[in-house]
Structure formats: C-alpha cells, structure tokens
Amino acid sequence: MTRIRRGYIARRRRTKIRLFASRAHSRLTRTITQQKIRALFSAHRDRGSQKINFRRLWITRINAVILEIGVSYSYSRLIHDLYKGRLLLNRKILAQIAILNRDCLYTISNEIIKEVGYKKSVGII
C-alpha cells in the first residue's frame, strides 16, 4: 500500500497559530498554543485594569488642577456638586478640560458653587 500524503489543512492551522508566538517558540506547536492561551488571558485581564488605571489618572489630573487653581474645595466635592447641579460631564472630559483649558474648569466650578450654594440657601434641596 502506498503512503498517503497529508493535506495542507493541519499545516495551515499551525502556521496561523504561529502568528501569536515569539521568535524563541515559533517552531513548537504545543508551546505556541500555550502562549496563545496565556496572551488571550492576559489581554482579557488587562482590559479591566486599563479602565481602572485611566479612571485613576483622570481623577488625579482633575484633583491636581483643582488644588492648583485654588478652588475652595476638593475633587470629591466638585463631583458631588456636578451631580447635584445635573451637569453631565464625565471624568474623562473633565480631565481633558483641566489639561487643555484650566480657566474653563475654573468657571465651571464657580458656576456650580453659585448654583448649588444658591439652592442650599433658598432651601430647595
């Protein structure tokens, strides 16, 4: 009986998997699959930590600018008053405003102070 030559399907699958591998392990199929599993696991895990890190960065930037320009309160008070005043600006946009245009953040904070302070003195809230 003559020998059957294997088709190209398995070879094509292995070459597709080799795209994930680094240079050292690019010839060994079993280690390539282990690296692929580890890479996909790390990518999934780090997407969540990336969101946490960016939120932490935005909060730090906003707080630094608030303390620098001399607004009379802290970051947490600003965010609380923004929610009370129903001004829908998320932390990412506030951080961009803080970096690019500090005067705009200063005027936003002053307007929020006026609006929330006014409502407190009148007794609406």
Image (tube, rainbow, N blue to C red):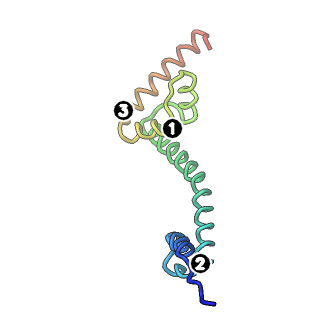
Q: How far apart are the two marked residues, 2 and 1, measured between alpha carbons?
A: 45 Å
Residue in front for this viewpoint, 19 or 120: 19
Q: Which mark is residue 91?
A: 1
Looking at the image, residue 111 lies above or below residue 100: above
Q: Position of residue 1 (x, y in %)?
A: 64, 90
Q: Residues within 10 Å of mark 1 (few under 14, many from 20)?
A: some
Lower position in the chain sequence, tag 1 or tag 3: 1
Foreground mark, 2 or 1, reads 2
Q: Position of residue 80 (x, y in %)?
A: 58, 29
Which image quarter: residue 28? bottom right
Which residue corresponds to mark 2? Answer: 29
Residue in front for this viewpoint, 72 or 42: 42
At 47% from the left and 32% from the top, the residue drawn is: 71
Foreground mark, 3 or 2, reads 2
Residue type beneath disc 1: Arg
Locate residue 31 relative to residue 114 in the image: left or right: right
- Mark 2, secondary structure of its residue: helix
